Amino acid sequence: MRMVDVIQKKRDKKELTKEEIEFFVNGYTDGSIPDYQASALLMSIYFNDMTDDERAALTMTMLNSGDKLDLSAISGIKVDKHSTGGVGDKTSLPLAPIVAALGISVPMISGRGLGHTGGTLDKLESIPGFKVEISEKDFIKQVSEMGLAIVGATGNIAPADKKIYALRDVTDTVDSIPLIAGSIMSKKIASGTDALVLDVKTGSGAFMKSEEDAIKLANALVRIGKSVGMNCMAVISDMNQPLGNTVGNTLEIEETVDILKDKGPKDITKLVEILACQMAVLGEKASSIEDAQKMVDEVIKNGKALEKFKEMIEYQGGDSNIIDDYTLMPHAKFKIELPALKTGTVSKITADEVGIASMLLGGGRQSKDDLIDYGVGIKFHKKVGDKVDEGQSILTIYSNTENVDNIKELLYNNINIGNEVKPIELIHKIIQ
Ligand code: URA
């Protein structure tokens, strides 16, 4: 087989065979296919899309390039959640203990933040002592014993995806639905869970800016999952403004605890509950969403979900006293208010630019090896639809330097105050 023929076929909008896709993925991973040919094929895929069969072959070849976790030692149905990423998206943190408190095993492999999006692992590391790098054996033991663990990738999961993703990043072929779908699902299938709830974001802070593309991606993800026997569904949720009131690592752990104490912001609490109900149904603990909602309410109200979070922190070496004393986590030296420049209703908060503001404060990474400043971030007092008076604080900036004029300017440029505002729909669609 010759790579030039594979490129030509995709360039001419023809369907690639499983063997041709294997030839490309394996050849690029072992170095026998050069960057320039792989780039040409990626760009052809970007423009000409892939059929369901091609997407399945791409996913399975990337999956088979590395290890697959064997979770068979954990009894019962294992359910995970994956979000396509956003700003202020701390959903996994309260969600996993809620679902574990229902008696479902939640083995969660999470990632770190890059650019404007935050990462679950970085947020957890703002808890003193918390360890996210755990061996596969200990990960399985923890989930078997207490029903839940949130860790970084163990072993060698989908190395082909790692290599292809790095090339996509520098050839502007990241936001291609078949390539994203293959990339996400190869890692999720390798992580060995039985069922998966996907939270596909749409809006300014998401990969998929339009609802139409988010629906296409969600359908692609669900179809790939089902083709390998994984029970999948997707929720399309809004990412036009940050989720919840906080963006930043310590701040998002504080908000997580607030949610588990039943005093969190309405939007994120609602999303967490919707995802938890879907996981309860996929985990066969509830026969309907209505039943699941009652169970979810109960474990939040009776403190069992918070207790699970505490247990997980202790199991992973962290200081669980943070639950009652937030001062035990790193905090920024300065709190600087951002007063509204006029009276009106907040009409827009551009999520990705808020993520960039938090990153510039030191809360995120501009490149992979940057260190995180856990205490910095942004706490909103007003969100889209809220009325605000001139001079009233819209948000607080948590910073370790006093001069934040550049951050203030960025935020002012990305927060609009108007008159009449259309409310944001948090859930756009559910795809079974
Ligand atoms: N997340 C992934 O893991 N892969 C993509 O291609 C995009 C988002």
Image (spheres, helix red, strand yellow):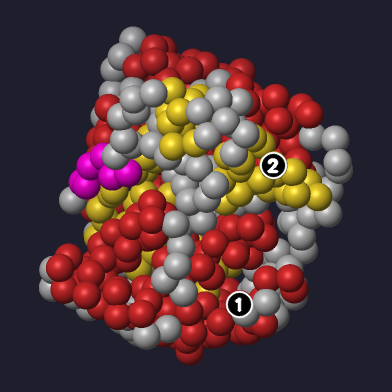
Write down the residue under mark 1. 323
Instruction: Judge from the rendering whether residue 301 lies leftward or rightward of residue 334; answer left or right.
Output: left
Element carrying mark 2? strand
Q: Is residue 428 magenta?
A: yes
Q: Position of residue 416 (x, y in %)?
A: 50, 25
Instruction: Judge from the rendering whether residue 172 lies leftward or rightward of residue 428; answer left or right.
Output: right
Q: CA distance from mark 1 to mark 2?
A: 26 Å
Q: What's the amino acid at mark 1? A: Ile
Instruction: Judge from the rendering whether residue 261 lies leftward or rightward of residue 328; answer left or right.
Output: left
Magenta residues?
426-431
User: Dot 1: few (<14), some (14–19), or many (≥20) neighbours within 10 Å?
Assistant: many
Q: Position of residue 223 (x, y in %)?
A: 24, 45
User: Dot 2: few (<14), some (14–19), or many (≥20) neighbours within 10 Å?
Assistant: some
Q: What's the amino acid at mark 2? A: Glu
Q: Is residue 47 visible?
A: yes
Disc sitting over residue 337 in the figure? 2
Where does the N terminus fall, quadrant-wise? Answer: top left
Residue nearest the viewer, comparing 73 with 278: 278
Q: Position of residue 71 (x, y in %)?
A: 43, 75
